Image (spheres, coloured by chain):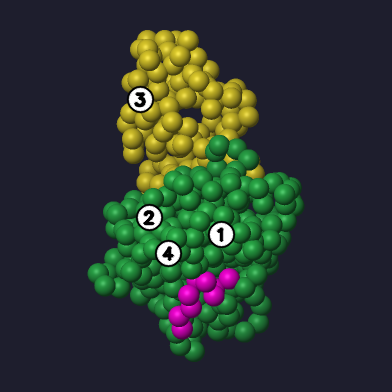
Chain colours: A green, B yellow
C-alpha cells in the first residue's frame, strides 16, 4: 500500500511556484517518478503533496541555442537526451553517462533534472554535468537564481534547493562544445545496476576535468588539471577529492582501487 | 480523481486514489492481471507496459499520470484467439518457464522490434536489460527474439553464424 498523498498537476509555472510555497506538510516534485515513487513505496519519504511538473506548459524542454548552450527542462527524459542529435554531436559525454543509467524503460521516464535533484552520490548524470561546467537555473515565487553544478550538491540527498524552489533548467554552456570525454561505471552485473564507482574524464582547451560518482557523499568534480600534468597527479587529485565507504556493494578499498584504475584508463583512452 | 484512458484499444473511465500506481489500477480496478508486480522498484520489469508508444515500469507511474494516455498490456497482444508472432516465438523456443516475467518481457520485445526490426544479440540483450527472468537464463528468450525478427531459419534452427555451436554465447 502506497503512502497516501494529494496530487496536483499545475499547468503554469506560477501555479507550480504557488504550490511549492504552500506551508504545512512536505511537498515533493514528480517528474519521471523513478526515484520518488520508489522512495514513497519504501516509506523513505512521506509527502503530503506530490506536484507533477510534466503538465506545466511554460517550463523549458530540450533545446539548443547557438552562443548559449543546451537547455534541459524538468520533463526531459534520459532517452530524449540519447535521441537528441544536438546532444550526440555537441555533448557526447552527456549521452554516454545517460546511456549507463538504469534500463531502457526506466530511461523512458527518468529525467536528467530528477537524477541530479535527488543528489544521490551515485548519480550518473552528475559526472558529465560537472565536467561540462553545467549550471542550474533555479526558480521560486521569490525569484530566480543560478548555481554552478560544482556548488549544487551539499551532501547525501542534499542540494542547495530550498523547499519552495524548483530546478527549472540545466544549461550546458556552448563553451563546452568540442570537449572529449568518456565515462566508466563499475557495476555488479553487465545489465542495469547502480554504480559502484563512476568516473568521467574530459579534456578541453588544455584542461582535464574529472567527474566522479559513488565515491563521496556527493558527486565530485576535480577541475584545473593541466594537459601537462601527468596521470600520477590526476590519480592523486582524484584520491584527495574522494572519500569512499564500504557498503553492501563493495569495500572502501575496492572503490579506491577502481577510482584509480578508471582514472588511469581514461587518461590513456581520452585523447 | 477521475481518470480516463485507453487500454488495448478499449476506453476506461474510473475514479482513482491519487496514490495508486498504474500497475495496481490495471490489475485491481480494470482486471488486467497479466501485468505483474515483481520488485516494485524499477529493477525487474515484470510490470512493463507500453504507454503512449513507450515502455514504462507501471509500478513507477501513478494512475493519475496516465490520464488521457493509451496503454498496451500483454492482454492486447493476442488477436482473435491467435498469439502474436512474438508470443508464438516464445512458445516455440521455450522462452517461458514460470511465466511471471513473460508479460513484461513480451512488451519490451515488442517495443524493441518496433524500434529495431532486426536487432543483433547485443541489441536484444540491451533491449531486455530492464526485464529480469530468473528461470530461462535468457538464452531461449534471445533465440525467440531472433526468430520473431526473422533472423533464424526453421523453428529449432540456430541461425548460421549467429549462434556458435548450436547455442548462443553466454553474456
In three-dimensional space, the C-alpha distance between marks 3 and 2, rounded to whole angstroms, equals 37 Å
Q: Are marks 3 and 2 on the same chain?
A: no
Q: Are marks 1 and 3 on the same chain?
A: no
Kindly identify which chain the residue marked by label 2 belongs to.
A
In three-dimensional space, the C-alpha distance between marks 4 and 1, rounded to whole angstroms, equals 13 Å
Residue shown at the point (45%, 84%) measured from the top left: A144
The vertical placement of B157 against A209, above or below, is above
The quarter of the picture where residue B120 lies is top left
The vertical placement of A155 against B36, above or below, is below
Residue A43 is situated, as x and y percent measured from the top left of the image, at 71, 60
To which residue does mark 4 refer? A207
Residue A145 is situated, as x and y percent measured from the top left of the image, at 46, 83
In three-dimensional space, the C-alpha distance between marks 1 and 2, rounded to whole angstroms, equals 19 Å
Label 1 neighbour load within 10 Å: few <14, some 14-19, many 20+: few
Q: Are marks 4 and 1 in contact (CB under 8 Å)?
A: no
Label 3 neighbour load within 10 Å: few <14, some 14-19, many 20+: some
Amino acid at each position: 500500500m502506497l503512502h497516501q498523498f494529494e496530487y496536483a498537476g499545475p499547468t503554469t509555472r506560477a501555479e507550480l511556484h504557488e504550490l511549492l510555497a504552500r506551508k504545512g506538510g512536505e511537498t515533493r516534485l514528480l517528474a519521471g517518478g523513478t526515484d520518488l515513487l520508489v522512495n514513497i513505496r519504501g516509506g523513505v519519504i512521506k509527502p503530503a503533496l506530490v506536484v507533477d511538473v510534466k503538465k506545466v506548459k511554460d517550463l523549458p524542454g530540450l533545446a539548443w541555442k547557438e552562443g548559449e548552450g543546451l537547455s534541459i527542462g524538468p520533463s526531459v527524459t534520459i532517452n530524449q537526451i540519447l535521441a537528441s542529435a544536438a546532444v550526440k554531436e555537441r555533448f557526447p559525454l552527456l549521452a554516454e553517462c545517460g546511456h549507463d543509467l538504469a534500463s531502457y524503460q526506466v530511461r523512458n521516464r527518468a529525467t536528467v533534472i530528477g537524477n541530479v535533484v535527488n543528489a544521490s552520490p551515485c548519480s550518473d548524470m552528475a559526472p558529465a554535468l560537472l565536467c561540462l561546467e553545467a549550471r542550474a537555473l533555479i526558480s521560486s515565487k521569490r525569484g530566480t537564481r543560478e548555481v554552478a553544478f560544482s556548488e549544487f550538491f551539499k551532501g547525501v540527498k542534499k542540494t542547495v534547493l530550498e523547499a519552495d524552489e524548483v530546478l527549472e533548467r540545466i544549461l550546458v554552456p556552448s563553451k563546452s562544445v568540442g570537449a572529449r570525454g568518456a565515462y566508466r561505471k563499475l557495476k555488479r552485473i553487465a545489465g542495469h545496476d547502480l554504480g559502484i564507482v563512476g568516473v568521467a574524464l574530459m579534456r578541453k582547451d588544455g584542461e582535464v576535468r574529472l567527474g566522479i560518482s559513488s565515491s563521496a557523499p556527493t558527486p565530485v568534480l576535480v577541475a584545473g588539471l593541466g594537459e601537462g600534468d601527468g596521470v600520477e597527479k590526476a590519480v592523486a587529485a582524484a584520491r584527495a577529492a574522494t572519500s569512499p565507504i564500504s557498503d553492501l556493494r563493495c569495500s572502501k578499498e575496492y572503490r579506491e582501487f577502481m577510482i584509480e584504475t578508471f582514472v588511469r584508463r581514461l587518461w590513456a583512452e581520452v585523447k | 480523481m477521475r481518470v480516463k484512458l485507453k487500454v488495448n484499444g478499449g476506453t476506461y473511465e474510473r475514479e482513482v486514489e491519487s496514490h495508486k500506481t498504474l500497475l495496481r489500477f490495471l490489475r485491481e480496478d480494470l482486471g488486467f492481471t497479466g501485468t505483474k508486480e515483481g520488485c516494485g522498484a524499477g529493477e525487474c520489469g515484470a510490470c512493463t507496459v507500453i504507454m503512449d508508444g513507450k515502455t514504462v515500469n507501471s509500478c513507477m507511474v501513478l494512475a493519475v499520470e496516465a490520464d488521457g494516455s493509451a496503454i498496451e498490456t500483454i492482454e492486447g497482444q493476442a488477436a482473435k484467439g491467435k498469439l502474436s508472432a512474438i508470443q508464438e516465438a516464445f512458445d516455440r523456443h521455450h522462452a517461458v518457464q514460470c511465466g511471471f516475467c513473460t508479460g513484461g518481457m513480451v512488451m519490451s520485445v515488442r517495443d524493441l522490434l518496433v524500434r529495431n526490426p532486426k536487432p543483433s544479440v547485443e541489441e536484444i540483450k540491451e533491449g531486455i536489460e530492464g526485464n529480469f527472468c530468473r528461470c530461462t537464463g535468457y538464452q531461449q528468450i534471445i533465440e525467440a527474439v531472433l526468430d520473431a525478427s526473422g533472423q533464424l531459419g526453421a523453428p529449432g534452427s540456430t541461425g548460421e553464424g549467429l549462434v556458435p555451436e548450436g547455442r548462443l554465447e553466454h553474456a
